[in-house]
Image (cartoon, grey):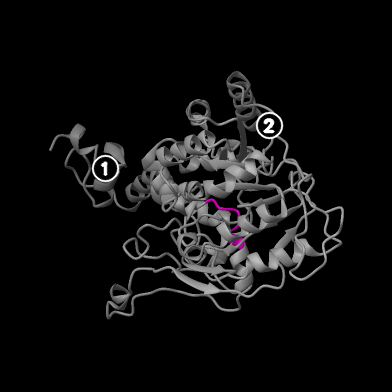
Amino acid sequence: MSLERDSLFDPAGPTTRAAGRAVRGTRSDGTKAAGPKAKAAALAVSEPRANRILGRLAEEKAAPPPVVPPALDGEVGSAVDGERRRGRGAVSNAAGRFEPAARILFDDGWQSLEDLPPLRTQVTEERARTVITRNQSPDIAFDRSINAYRGCEHGCVYCFARPTHAYHGLSAGLDFETKLFVKPDAPELLARELSQSSYQPRVIAMGTNTDPYQPIEKRYEVTRRLLEVLSEFGHPVGIVTKSGLVARDIDILAPMAERGLVKVAISITTLDPHLARTMEPRAASPHVRLGTIRRLADAGIPTAVLTAPLIPALNDMEVERILDAAKAAGASEAGYVMLRLPLEIADLFREWLVTHFPDKARHVLGLIRQMHGGKDYDAAFGKRMRGDGPYAWTVGRRFEIAARRLGLAGRGLKLTTAHFRRPKPAGVQLSLFD
């Protein structure tokens, strides 16, 4: 092997090799070395280069590893095998943040993990005392809402409702998608609350926490029965959903719309079916959601498109296309929300991003932190749903320009409380003026 070619594999280079031969007692010309002094001179030549090599190796070893998210709350072994979680959004199922013990999956050598069955949806009936939830958030347009379900089978990895499962001792990860709660008596509770003489009607929001038309609604029909109660009382309601199942209830919604009692917002985050299936595995496909807007609009039901959430460098480039498609389908309003990562969702989203989009992970996470002052999330009112900084400003202006161009900007039909009436119980004498 020539000297030049050999140097490719020898970091020390020819100078060090010559010094090495001197240490062994032979000079480069073949004569004997002159004892200890020659050895000391050789070491003086080779030591600095060797130190540089060792220093470089130490730097490489100390360098930060690639962006691989830690397990939630520092736990290990919370990731679930891909086959077991097929059709689910989250990658892991770490214990809830209030739990004193952590769940750790590990193979004990008997391949026991291979025997675990796929994750199935479990539904628990919950008996609640009230059904209307109140809030006083200054950056939300409603002060009351109804959530007939806890947890959501749609499995949207970014869902800001995930951390609420910790109050049940469950994980915000896969538990949120597979261990659901339903309030079967919610319609009766609603009728009782609306009948109270102290109740003052204002728009009730549905779908603000979990989707009221998620797959289990086909079996329980709690949302449909809630709408029947609201229609009977003449009470206004706003609905947000990713499901085409809302079109099932057009027979209730259309008459309510004629009285100015209902608006529906269809959430569309992307027109890319592959991204939608990865990000929202059990929600309706983009073309089904657009078709749902068309069906609702044709029935005379005011329908908005909600681009929520917009994720930097992942789906925010689709803003104009989504609004164009929604307008063509019949949408009359539009709104947007930037990605929110409170509590456990930051880790869940990070590991999902690294799993499915490793080439984009650093860029996406960097932009998210730019919008939140260097943090994953800023919970300040007015910033939490819009973000801050140049990137958030740019996305917001793009949305506003596109919405204005299409006639989707501003608030549309304002719902009314003028039709609110409390039905008289059976056997009660009616007033002369009712």
The 10 Å Cα crowd at callout 2, few under 14, some 14 to 19, many 20 or more, is: some
Label 2 is placed on what type of residue? Gly
Residue receiving disc 2: 412
Q: Residues within 10 Å of mark 1 (few under 14, many from 20)?
A: few
The quarter of the displayed image where residue 12 is located: top left
Q: Is residue 106 visible?
A: yes
Q: Residue furthest top?
A: 405
Among the two numbered marks 2 and 1 on one chain, the one whose residue lies closer to the N terminus: 1
Residue 427 lies in what quarter of the image? bottom right
Return the residue nearer the eye: 1 or 68. 68
Closest to the observer, 68 or 115: 115
Does residue 386 sit above or below 43 in this rendering?
A: above
Question: Label 1 amino acid?
Answer: Asp
In the rendered view, does 342 fall on the left or right side of 278? right
In percent of width and height, residue 86 lies at 35, 59
- Of residues 396 and 327, which is closer to you in this image? 327
Q: Which residue is mark 1?
A: 10
Q: Residue at x 31, y 42 (%)?
A: 11
In which quadrant is the C terminus drawn?
bottom right
Residue located at (77% from left, 46% from top): 417
Q: CA distance from mark 2 to mark 1?
A: 73 Å
Give the x, y percent position of residue 313: 50, 35
- Residue at left offset 87%, top offset 53%: 433
Magenta stretch in the rendered image:
158-163
Look at the image and tell me whether residue 66 can be seen.
no
| Residue 185: % across, % down | 62, 70
Numbered disc 2: secondary structure = loop
Q: Nearer the viewer, mark 2 or mark 1?
A: 2
* SS state under label 1: loop
Q: What percent of the width, then of the height, locates residue 178? A: 46, 66
Magenta segment includes 161: yes
